[in-house]
Amino acid sequence: MTAIHPTPSGTRDVLPDELREVHAIEEAVRRVFTGRGYGEIRTPALEYEQVLTRGDPAAADPAYKLFDEQGNVLVLRSDMTIPIARVVGTRYAAASPPLRFCYVAHAYRSVRPQRGQDREMLQAGIELVGVPAHEGTAETLAVLSEVLDAVGLTDYRIGLGDASLYPALLDAHGVPAPARAAILHELVTRDFVGLEREVEGLRLGGEATAALVEVPQKRGGPEVLDHAGTAADGLRTVLDMLPAVVRERVILDLGLARSLGYYTGAVFEVYDAALGAPLGGGGRYDDLLGRFGRDLPAAGWALNVERLHIALVGERRGELL
Amino acid sequence: MSLGGLRLAVPRGALMRDTLDLLDALGVDSAEVRANDRKLLFEDAGLITMRPSDVPTYVEAGAADLGITGKDVLAEQSERAVYELLDLRLGPCVMVVASTAGEDRLDEALRRLGVMRVATKYPRIAARHFERTGRQAEIVEVKGSVELAPLTGLAEGIVDLTATGTTLRENGLVIREEILASTARLIANPVAHKLRAAAIDDLVARIRAVMAR
């Protein structure tokens, strides 16, 4: 009997047969990145903890934390967005925007390991810095769609929402701060029963209650934007700017909420029927770079390469990539 | 009438009959499910049957688009990435702390030994409840017949689900605290919730109409 030497929970080895297919995906992704003028960058897997928490306080709960020989707290990065924000604030402090960066790199999160969800995950993504609001969002979505096409996925859809939409709705109906936190918690944890309970507890009257409960459950074609009035103007503009081939992939989702705290505007997720979880996602984060000294609007996304691979294998059973 | 091509995970056990009655009211023929106690997959009706605690597993992975299970199960598996769409108000019951009648042995253990032993099938709900209320508890996980634990000295009390309280009473246990009220919920896979939006919304509307009758 040979001894068993396990890898840490949520990590695993990748052997040649799998890696060959993963490389094919990476090559397709990089071709699109290069063609679109995005420059690939690498950053250290280890960052000072205070760098990550400056970007997002929630990043203070990383999977792996360690000390260096001087007692500094180091963490393995939980995504590439905050490290790139740091790079822009330091190495590109005087460069004139727009800046276009891409990466294919590992990130580390304390997730519950399951199918397509390792604690060490390979992400491919872009960050577009300095192109304001809708134009920048539309560009990142167009690149996203081009990447998914290049990888060979045929059935994917892109869920598109706006992180500022529901808070604006809460403002419009005068929901006080403590109740807001409770309601947003229900939304982020995908509990519409809890959302209805919290909203009804406010006794706002029929119309306001209906709006706050029903609007975040609206998803589908452009007609769903009618439910949100002027709060959806941003989404309308983005949609108009998208090429038709991208627009027909979009599912508008007025309740889309991503767990990362730094999103300020458009947010998106990628779905494929071959996998029960999103392949990746992203959005607009106009306040993040300011925390690193360059007050520039930015947007980006990351795809989980392992999930891309699972979806691809699911769509094309038996074919080699 | 079927489920619009959706696959629904149906819980076996206490919620099964109410769930099948609901499906009948929606026009989904559940006769085959009722007649086959051992069959698990009913392709034509779009139904699969399983233990209630397995429903979130299948729905999260997308092996079922939708599922019906108790809030107790969802609270115990709160990390599951599923949408909770609708309170079906079926199978109402309460998660309680109970111990043997007479002086509360839980209190005594906490006071004199600093920690109380609590047996349960719901270790995370129990641990969260005692953390939240500032009491040290050793959670003893068992898989069935929790009532036995305080009667045999395995634990001073239990955390368990009760509908009528009959089983607790028959075993000489009394309810000390209520933790949460539970009813059956309709849950959805997060990807199916987007890709099959129209079919899911249509089903939810039909269920709401049946419940309003």
Image (cartoon, coloured by chain):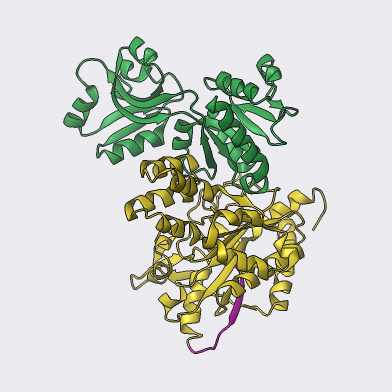
Chain colours: A yellow, B green
Q: Where is residue B41? Give x, y as percent.
A: 70, 27
- Residue depicted at 65% across the width and 67% down the height: A141
- In this view, the residue farthest toward the left is B112
Rendering quarter of residue B93:
top left
Q: From what the image shows, is residue A166 above or below residue A284?
A: above
Q: From what the image shows, is residue B15 above or below residue A268?
A: above
Q: Which residues are magenta?
A: A94-105
Q: How many marks are shown on the rendered structure?
A: 0
- In this view, the residue farthest toward the right is A319
Q: From what the image shows, is residue B2 above or below residue A65?
A: above
- Residue depicted at 45% across the width and 72% down the height: A287
User: In the rendered view, does B40 fall on the left or right side of B77?
Assistant: right
User: In the rendered view, does A160 fall on the left or right side of B5?
Assistant: left
Q: Where is residue B3? Give x, y as percent.
A: 69, 32
Which corner quadrant holds the N terminus of chain A?
top right
Q: Is residue A127 magenta?
A: no
> Is A197 in front, or is B193?
A197
User: In the rendered view, does A112 fall on the left or right side of A18?
Assistant: left
Which corner quadrant holds the C terminus of chain A?
bottom right
Q: Where is residue B4? Give x, y as percent.
A: 71, 35
Q: Where is residue A14? Give x, y as percent.
A: 66, 57
> Is A98 in front, or is A104?
A98
Q: Is residue A96 magenta?
A: yes
> Is A96 in front, or is A40?
A96
- Residue depicted at 52% across the width and 53% down the height: A8
> Is A202 in front, or is B53?
A202
**Residue A23 visible in the shown view:** no
- Residue depicted at 58% across the width and 30% down the height: B209
Q: From what the image shows, is residue A51 above or below residue B89?
A: below
